[in-house]
Image: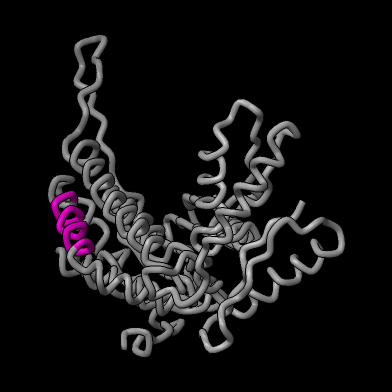
């Protein structure tokens, strides 16, 4: 039971981790890019070898279905191999630059220092590992803070990275609440950079915290949410439209920044698209995410469920229902919200 053994880091542990990472960063940065690349490639192999464990954890901790988890594992492996390639090509040896007057000019790339990587619950393996592997590839040491809701998946990913050869001083795991662990990290003047995937509100909070420090300007990489739309005209192949709508809107129970929220249809093809879409939605299976037959699992928390149902309540008063799925039986555990379409 990995979930039961993930303990929140204390403020003192955060401070100590920053000191260790800062002290070790020059040594990690001096390591040849090819050496760091080899470690990340071994980590990719280990992630693939632990597919079953990740699938079980993702279903239990994040409510992810098998097909969503397999796609996420593939993305994770892709991140590790991509950043390994970048380390080998861009951080191995200096690049020779032109010397117009006969001088020798070289460009070499180095890490900035200690990076705090703060990742979300909707892609608890892929985005978590992507942030960490990018920072490690570039010669930075990393303090990895996973989402509050999904620490066990991240804990296994960190264990495999250590097993692959990442020194513990170069990658430290700091689970906990954003208001405690995240706030301590982003306010510390020893942090050289922050990578965040999360809400716009969180990005603003971190931006203000970094600006308020009496320290050199930190790098801040923020990937936040959005309102995504698809526009379909009469030239589109309806079957392809419906397939794309289903995947974008309902995979991961709609819980991703790229999920389709608004579908604009040209009047000429709207009736045909809606008829085919409702037919496809009738085939969706909503329920236990551990089962291979399940298409749509639960949303992450009771709070998320309440917010979504509040939005549904507003739509029911202002829009025409096109299709509303039935929820699974009451004995299926989880916070479920049925896929719906309103016109």
Residue 224, compared with residue 313, is above or below; it is above
Decide if residue 4 is on the left or right side of residue 197. Answer: left
Is residue 43 highlighted in magenta?
yes
Residue 115, compared with residue 262, is above or below; it is below
Where, quadrant-wise, is the N terminus in this rendering?
bottom left
Rendered residue at 62%/63% (across/down): 339
Decide if residue 313 is on the left or right side of residue 205. Answer: right
Q: Residue furthest top?
A: 101
Q: Position of residue 26 (x, y in %)?
A: 24, 56
- The one of 187 and 253 positioned closer to us in this rendering: 253
Q: Which of the colour schemes (rainbow, by chain, secondary structure, one colour) is used?
A: one colour
Q: Residue furthest right?
A: 317
Rendered residue at 16%/69% (across/down): 163
Decide if residue 134 is on the left or right side of residue 299. Answer: left
Q: Is residue 15 visible?
A: no
The main secondary structure of the magenta stretch is helix
- The one of 298 and 7 positioned closer to us in this rendering: 298
Is residue 180 highlighted in magenta?
no
Rendered residue at 24%/9% (across/down): 101
Q: Position of residue 329 (x, y in %)?
A: 56, 83
Q: Position of residue 301 (x, y in %)?
A: 57, 78
Rendered residue at 56%/47% (across/down): 245
Region rendered in magenta:
37-48
Q: Position of residue 324 (x, y in %)?
A: 68, 64
């Amino acid at each position: 039971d990995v979930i039961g053994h993930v303990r929140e880091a204390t403020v003192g542990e955060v401070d100590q981790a920053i000191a260790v990472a800062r002290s070790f960063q020059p040594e990690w940065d001096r390591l040849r890019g090819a050496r760091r690349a080899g470690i990340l490639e071994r980590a990719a192999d280990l992630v693939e070898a632990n597919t079953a464990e990740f699938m079980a954890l993702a279903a239990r901790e994040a409510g992810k279905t098998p097909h969503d988890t397999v796609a996420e594992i593939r993305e994770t492996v892709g991140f590790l191999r991509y950043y390994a390639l970048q380390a080998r090509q861009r951080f191995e040896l200096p690049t020779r630059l032109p010397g117009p007057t006969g001088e020798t000019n070289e460009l070499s790339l180095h890490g900035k220092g200690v990076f705090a990587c703060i990742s979300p619950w909707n892609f608890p393996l892929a985005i978590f590992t992507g942030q960490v592997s990018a920072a490690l590839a570039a010669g930075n040491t990393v303090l990895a803070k996973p989402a509050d809701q999904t620490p066990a998946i991240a804990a296994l990913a960190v264990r495999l990275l250590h097993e692959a050869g990442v020194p513990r001083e170069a990658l430290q795991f700091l689970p906990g609440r954003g208001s405690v662990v995240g706030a301590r990290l982003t306010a510390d003047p020893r942090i050289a950079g922050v990578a965040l995937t999360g809400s716009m509100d969180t990005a603003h909070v971190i931006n203000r915290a970094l600006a308020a420090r009496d320290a050199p300007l930190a790098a801040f990489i923020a990937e936040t949410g959005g309102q995504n739309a698809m526009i379909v005209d009469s030239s589109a192949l309806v079957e392809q439209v419906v397939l794309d709508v289903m995947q974008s809107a309902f995979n991961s129970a709609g819980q991703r920044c790229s999920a389709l929220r608004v579908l604009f249809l040209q009047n000429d093809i709207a009736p045909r698209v809606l008829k085919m879409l409702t037919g496809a939605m009738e085939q969706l299976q909503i329920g236990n995410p551990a089962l291979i037959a399940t298409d749509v699992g639960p949303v992450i928390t009771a709070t998320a469920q309440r917010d979504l149902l509040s939005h549904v309540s507003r739509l029911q008063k202002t829009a025409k229902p096109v299709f509303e799925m039935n929820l699974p039986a009451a004995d299926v555990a989880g916070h479920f919200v049925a896929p719906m379409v309103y016109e």
